[in-house]
Amino acid sequence: MSRNPRRRNNPIRMCSDCESITDQPILIQRIDHPDGRGWGLYACLTCAPKHLSPVGARSLWILHVADCWECNNEAECTISQALRQVFEAATEPS
């Protein structure tokens, strides 16, 4: 871990939907190129739910919670809450 005070732990990305800058990006799509280079499309917490299926949101949530210090030690973080709301909404009875 770097001790450089200018280095951020959270990545900063631009939302591919609303084009706002977010320090809590959620990967919504991985673009793979035939030559091996690839990149990810990210969304902010507000836009991400409309791009994720319930199954995709649950998979991302499981991966996120496994690596998130805040989710494992204190309380659920905002990224975890946004992902969980997507798949829980699909399982609620109408």
Image (cartoon, rainbow, N blue to C red):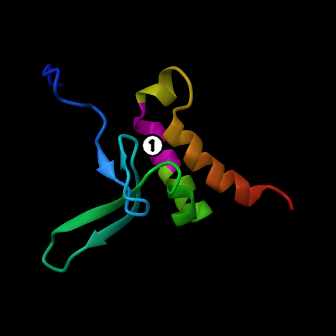
Three-letter amino acid code of the residue under disc 1 = His
Observer-nearest of 59 and 22 = 22
- In the foreground, 84 or 49: 49
Q: Main secondary structure of the magenta part?
A: helix
Left or right side of 32 for 88:
right
Q: Position of residue 41 (x, y in %)?
A: 34, 62
Quadrant showing the C terminus:
bottom right
Q: Residue furthest bottom?
A: 34
Classify residue 19 as left or right of residue 49. left
- Image quadrant containing the N terminus: top left
Mark 1 Cα-neighbour bin, 10 Å: few <14, some 14–19, many ≥20: some
Residue at 48%, 52% in the rendered image = 60
54 left or right, relative to 12: right
The secondary element bearing badge 1 is classed as helix
Q: Is 74 part of what is drawn in magenta?
A: no
Q: According to the image, label 1 marks what residue?
A: 64
Query: In the image, is residue 84 above or below residue 53?
Result: above
- The x, y position of residue 24, in whole percent, is 40, 42
* Number of numbered discs on residues: 1
Magenta residues (range) = 61-68
Please state the horizontal and vertical placement of residue 13, each as a whole percent of the image.
30, 49
Eyeballing the image, is 75 above or below 81? above
The relative height of residue 69 versus residue 19 in the rendered view (above or below) is: above
The location of residue 91, given as percent across then percent down, is 75, 57
Residue at image position (52%, 37%) is 78
62 falls in the magenta region: yes
Q: For residue 11, which quarter of the picture?
A: top left
